Image: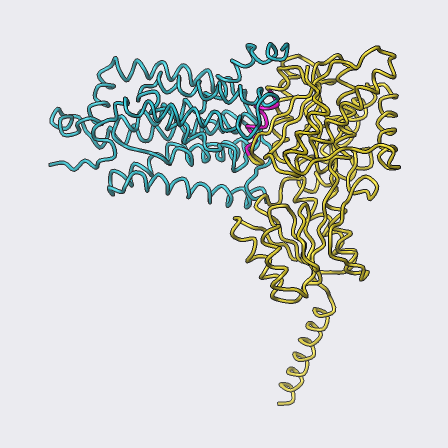
Chain colours: A yellow, B cyan
Amino acid sequence: MKKALILLTLVVLGLSLVTLTGLGKGKIGIVLDVGGRGDLSFNDMGFKGTDQAAKDFGLQMVEVQSATAADYLPNIRNLARSGDFDLIICVGFLLGDALNQAAQEFPDQKFAIIDSVVDQPNVMSIVFRENEMSALVGALGGVIAAYYGYDYVGTVLGIEIPVLYHFEAGYRFGIDWGLNKYKEHEGLAAKPNVGLLYTYTGTFDDVAKGKAATEAQLAQGAVAVYNVAGPLGIGDLEAITEKHKAMGTESGPPFYFGVDSDQDWMGNAKYTLASGMKRVDIACYDAVQSVVDGTFKGGVHSLGLKEGGVGISGIKELLDFMDFGIKAGAIKASDTYQIIANWASNRAAIPYWIWEAIDELKAGILDGSIQVPTADTRDQMLAVRAQYPLER
Amino acid sequence: MSALGDIFTIQLLLAALRLASPIALVALGETFSERAGIINVGVEGTAVLGALVTALVSYFTGNAWIGLIAAMIAGGLAGALHAVWCIRFRANHVVSGIGINILVAGLALFITSSVWGWRGTSASAPTISTWYITTAAFLIIFASQVFMFRTKWGLRLRVVGEKPEAADTAGINVHRTRYVYTILNGILCGLAGAFFFNSVGRFTSGMVGGRGFIGIAAMVIGNYSPIGGLGAAILFGFIDALQMRLQSYIPSQFSIMLPYLITVIALAFFIKRANVPAALGKHYVKQ
């Protein structure tokens, strides 16, 4: 009898201890759209940033993937209904409508969403000024096209949605800026005759389409192709690799420009030069931190170069994201030195003044002396296209 | 307009042929099975299965050729499954085909997430040049044209799809013929799937992207002949290759639609003239 009593006391004590620690630990929920993990880019970065924040602040993270679009609302609701979550982060434009509804149903729950604006007081809407980093990538593309004597700069895009207009608008501006810079530096009478090739593939998962579109642009003489369709980049890079094989070259143009994460390590960095980064990981981290600090505020948070939300890749990011790739099993740790060597030699092959020019553009955007155009509607996009036609 | 000169090059033609080859393979497979009387709308899923199995086997064996063979075997098995449903159990052909599409869609997510930990994507794996498959596709298609219209085996195949009773009376095993060609259809779709994988070296669940269904349309436009199906596939491939190059001149929303639009128009035009096998989709019960 006595033994049983002691045992019972111990069990009760143990249970209460578990509950207490459980209560003491906050929870962060993350809901992903149908794209899901494994893209080594947008979704994985959302996961990475949230996971890092959860570790740093001693929180528990719960991850929910959505199998179909019909799961968005139930997934968000399930997390919100429990009332346990300090913050629920929705990663991706596609979750916007579902969140708009859930946010009204659970007005006391704090939410954050990436890439979409949900006009509710309890939702932090995080959007990026992708036009700014795309301008940097475009400037690099424009200058190297002129430098290597190519006719075009290319970009392969996904579905024609407003977010992608940010990229196209910035890229166009950047190419034009780069060509003017080249003219100025070389003392030419006229801007080099370089055009832009752009293809909206209408898909974010048909990798073969990305490859075919890239092949088409390379055949027309593109010096580099900027991937603006996440996973399609695998196909883009494959086309570029085959082009090099056909030409019998091991380095040099045509190049691949990565997107969202730093994709410079892809294909062992043989044909990559730079990536236009959209730091979803930093955005998610900051959102969690704002809840921990008690500074969480609803409304639109626009992240650009100034906030460190977007940028062009450098060596620090290469190292960070190689680590990311190793953990995901996409690259071998033993390849890292080769990747760094390839990457550095690609960059070193380009005159230093070009990199200085990119820094100059970056500084101009940062201090506001250079305004990069953007577009949210088709009409605005057409206006930017008319302003920077980039036709040959 | 120097840019237009950059568009109409030999590259455009090569791109068209390459984009056409998986569609032509599906069209050929479907021609075989429909000539025997079996409709298979599961070709889309069978091609996805082919791509998935190529990824799996190439990844684990490190040999893309073994992956290619495995894809054809897997495709053949999917064809056999369809044949058993349609012939042995007399299921509705279309329902069984849709079942295969749904089954493979689920299987792809399950296998990718359990093997590689990513839902819907594989890790990268060794590949072979897709030109091998494209060249093989052309050779197979020309050989099939001769086989179907110039040999006694081809004649028997066509009789089974037109008038199975007559074929039976003449001593042709109707069911066995249907099994053979439905499995062959699966093998060819598996090969088409291997093409998709080898073109990028990594499986993604959206990589076939409706081209299996376009293959069925190509077969109808090509009037149930191997060469005709190839022609329709090349038309689709050419317009697809062209539209990507024309986006600087026409809005993408329209240009992306072009290959499909032309397929639908061609389908509407050709379907009236198509010689649909008389016993297509009908179960044969021996009297």
Residue in view at x 37 percent, y 25 percent: B27
> Looking at the image, which is closer to me, A321 or A275?
A275
Quadrant showing the N terminus of chain A: bottom right
A336 or B48: nearer the eye? B48
Q: Farthest residue to the bottom: give it.
A: A1
Residue at x-position 77% and y-position 58%? A296
Segment colored magenta:
A206-215
Q: Measuring from the top left, give residue A57's x and y in whole percent.
A: 78, 58
Is residue A323 on the magenta stretch? Answer: no
Is the magenta region chiefly helix, strand or loop?
helix
Q: Quadrant of residue B61?
A: top right
Find residue A382 and report its image quarter. Answer: top right
- Across and down, in percent, residue A112 comes to 69, 54
Tell me: A371 left or right of B93.
right
Residue B79 in the image: state x and y as whole percent. 35, 34
Above or below, B182 relative to A282 = above
Across the whole image, how many numbered discs are drawn on residues? Answer: 0
Task: Tell me which residue sits at (33%, 23%) in the image.
Answer: B269
Magenta-colored stretch includes residue A213: yes
Foreground: A237 or A134?
Answer: A134
In the image, taking residue B158 as reference, residue A189 lies left or right, namely right
Q: Position of residue B148 (x, y in %)?
A: 28, 17
Q: Along the horizontal axis of the image, is B243 left or right of B153? A: right
Closer to the camera in the image, A172 or B181:
A172
Quadrant hosting residue A39: top right
Q: Is residue A185 visible?
A: yes
Q: Quadrant of the C terminus of chain A?
A: top right
Question: Taking the image as drawn, is residue B66 in sight?
Answer: no
